[in-house]
Image (spheres, grey):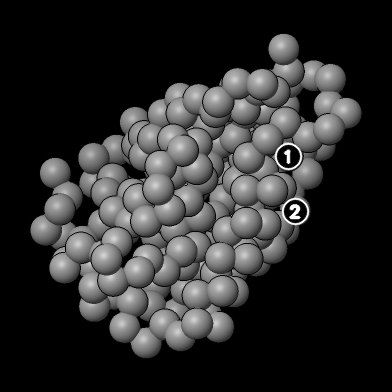
Amino acid sequence: MTTRRLYLARHGAADAFGELTDIGRRQAGLLGERLAGVPVDAVLHSPLPRAVASAHELARHLPENVPVTEAAELVDHVPYVPSPAETTPSWAGFFDGYDDAEAASGRRLAEALVARFAKVPEGVQSDTHEVLVTHAYPIAWLVRHALDAPPSRWLGLNSANTALTVIEYRNGLPPTIVMFNDMSHLPPDLRWTGFPEGIRP
């Protein structure tokens, strides 16, 4: 049975302008070293600079023939704005200012993300291994989708910078989450960036 294996990674640590920092480059390089033993078919990345730079940094550790390309579906976006009834008090303020047009745009992006990546592509006869360098929210949306959880459950599924999440897809079977937010390739001082200080272990 053909398996599509997605290696999802949030970009490395970035500055306030969205540019990769020296720490982010180190994180991306270490992720690349970890993935060097995987038969990667392609690296796809968000159009945003912090993801572009992370993808190219990790790809330095992969064979030269592995393509590195942009995928618009991986851009940072809010995939689903929950109704007030679905929103816990701790998240209520987060959605202040989101209008219907922004919510609809985010939902369209989320649907495009799932349509492109959350399945085995038609006509593919052999296993594939794709690295997707993206952002915390698209990763949370794909994990929520794999779990067949309600749309609002993407909230709180955060990912650290260059943490690794792996999801497998097979025709006729539900997706398998192999790992989520794994940071074992990072030394302790480079882990948990991207999380608020108060919730880092």
Residue 127 rendering spot, x and y as whole percentages: 73, 20
Q: CA distance from mark 2 to mark 1?
A: 8 Å
Query: Where is mark 2, residue-wise?
Result: 69
Residue at the spot 39% in from the left edge and 35% down from the top edge: 180
Residue 20, compared with residue 65, is above or below; it is below
- What is the residue that sits farthest to the right in this orientation? 123
Residue 191 rendering spot, x and y as whole percentages: 28, 45
156 or 45, which lies in front? 156
Query: Where is mark 1, residue-wise?
Result: 42
118 or 11, which lies in front? 118
Q: Can residue 151 be seen by looking at this rendering?
A: yes
User: In terms of image quadrants, where is residue 104?
Assistant: bottom right
Residue at the spot 36% in from the left edge and 39% down from the top edge: 181
Q: Can residue 185 be seen by looking at this rendering?
A: no
Residue 99 rendering spot, x and y as whole percentages: 46, 85
- Of mark 2 and mark 1, the one earlier in the sequence is 1
Residue at the spot 60% in from the left edge and 35% down from the top edge: 6
19 or 89, which lies in front? 89
- Relative placement, left or right, of 48 versus 31 is right
| Viewport quadrant of the C terminus | top left
Q: Amino acid at mark 1?
A: Ala
Kindly state the secondary structure of the residue where label 1 is placed.
Answer: strand
Residue 40, compared with residue 50, is above or below; it is above
